[in-house]
Image (spheres, rainbow, N blue to C red):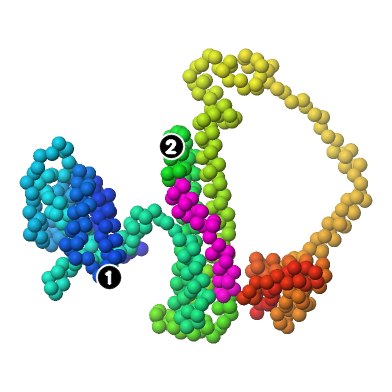
Amino acid sequence: MPLGTGVFATLPENFFSPLARANREHYANLLLIYYRLFQENARGIEREQVVRSFIDYLGLHRNTLIDETPADESSDTGDGSPDGAIENDADLLTPELDFDNEDDEPSPAEPSDKSPAVPNFLNDRALASRFLRRLINAGWLSEETLADYTKVINITPYGRPFLEALAKVDEGLKTEYESHVVAIYSLLCTDAVTDNGHYAVRNAYSQTLALLDSLKVLSQSIKGYYDRISVDAAEFGISGILHLQYDEYAPQILDAAYKRLKTSDNLSRYRPKILEQVGDLLRNDAWLDASARKLVVMKAQTQAECRRQLEDMLEEIRSTLNAVDPLLREIDHRNSLYARSSTERIKVLLEPDSTIAGKIGALVKEIHRGNKGLYHRLSHRLHRIRTFAPESLYRRQKKEAPDFIQAAASTDNAALERAETLFMDRLLNQLGVKRVGNWLDEQGGREGLLASTDLVQDEASFIRFIYSVLYADSRQSFDYTIEEKPEYESIDAAGYAVPDLLLRRKG
């Protein structure tokens, strides 16, 4: 990507500077305070209200503010001020009036038993105003003066995504798996997709990717905890492992995501209906053309390109929903792996001699310490001698080499021929993709739809029907697809309980 394009062609040069200083935690908290105020109001927030909110926060955390040295400011590239001056954190805490408010006059220093990091001559209002001005100069917020001279604080367009990210991190990255699945179903399986298919498919595609990303993040989060307990086990005592399990893993992973994922039935309930609807939309040429014409208005592309995009997004939705199951199994495996590893670590710390690994670890420690009473202390029961010598090694008795020539001569040639014949018969009778497809063609698949009751007549046809459904659901090279009915039912066919569905030949 050439220089002058991308993220830093849009963001100010010092956009991230407030979050890269010693007071970065306070800058982040102040941004979150403003963002929550912004969410509660339909328009920007009056400057006075923002300053009062900042005063409340800084009054509680004044003693934790740090007066950074000028050396820390040498890497700053400027804040966009008219005169090019750099307003650093050291300047932020110096006695300078904020003329935007008449009552920002610094108050005299008051004696205190503590020695705060911030000078006492700055009153809370002046300090809050200067923190606000620093965020405005960095480009996170913007200030607007209305016709009645009221000053309003707004979010800059390029700062909004970063504020949303800060809010999500602060809230613990709670993921609503159910909302993604319900949103996909609501977009594709309701009347909205008929009239506004171009909107519905694009939003459903975004929700599908969000669902997959959420599951990937959950899987990697569990792996992160497992790596911590495995790689850094020496740093965790029993209290550390319990803290990691019950104070971090349980609320952030189990309660916030995993339990909700396993107890919700939205995925299993809505996924078959979504997949069926996606298949119907891909076969509906009239709907695809109408939706593509509407999409042309939004994009400077041809109708054929817009239709291809709709088809690609629908195919991606279907393939993504089908690929969720392996990811769910991986999440279950990693969760059980972490739980087992955590339990074993605690067991080793409580009873080191209860496992082979614990005994070896204790043995190594005693050898390192030079303990002479090691033999009497560790009842390993591996040997009954006090010293090792060459004659104390166990030596396996050598066996005579088998006579392959004699064994080959005694082979029953007739038995080999019978086994070869049986193997060839089984190979010829295998129900492969081609054989099952030919069988469906013989049943009339080229003329129309094949129903379950028409295909299952006896035991042999029932087995072929099972293979047909399996191949149609999992093999792209198979010539037939499944068309399920709106309401899933199990029917009786020749004494067998089979699903009520239809098989359609592709093309």
Which residue is denoted by mark 1 in the rendering?
Answer: 42
At label 1, the amino acid type is Ala
Q: Say which quarter of the image contains residue 431.
A: bottom right
Residue 181 percent location from the top left of the image: 50, 66
**Which one is nearer the viewer's eye here, 330 or 347?**
347
Q: Say which quarter of the image contains residue 322.
A: bottom right
Residue 393 percent location from the top left of the image: 68, 20
- Callout 1: SS: loop
Q: Please determine whether, in this image, residue 328 is positioned above or below residue 452.
A: above
Using the image, tell me which numbered label, if any, was put on residue 19.
Answer: none
User: Residue placed at 18% from the left, 42% from the top?
Assistant: 117
Using the numbered discs, state the Cα–Cα distance from disc 2 to disc 1 in whole angstroms.
46 Å
Q: Secondary structure of the magenta portion, mostly? A: helix
User: Residue placed at 90% from the left, 44% from the top?
Assistant: 411
At label 2, the amino acid type is Gly
Quarter holding the C terminus is bottom right
Relative to 140, 282 lies left or right = right
Q: Which span is picked out in magenta? A: 249-278
Q: Is residue 190 magenta?
A: no
Using the image, tell me which numbered label, if any, was put on residue 240.
Answer: 2
User: Residue placed at 54% from the left, 85% from the top?
Assistant: 286
User: Residue placed at 70% from the left, 73% from the top?
Assistant: 500
Label 2 environment density (alpha carbons within 10 Å; few <14, some 14–19, many ≥20): some
Quarter holding the N terminus is bottom left
Label 1 environment density (alpha carbons within 10 Å; few <14, some 14–19, many ≥20): few
Q: Is residue 473 visible?
A: yes
Residue 146 percent location from the top left of the image: 16, 72
Q: Please determine whether, in this image, residue 301 is positioned above or below residue 54.
A: below
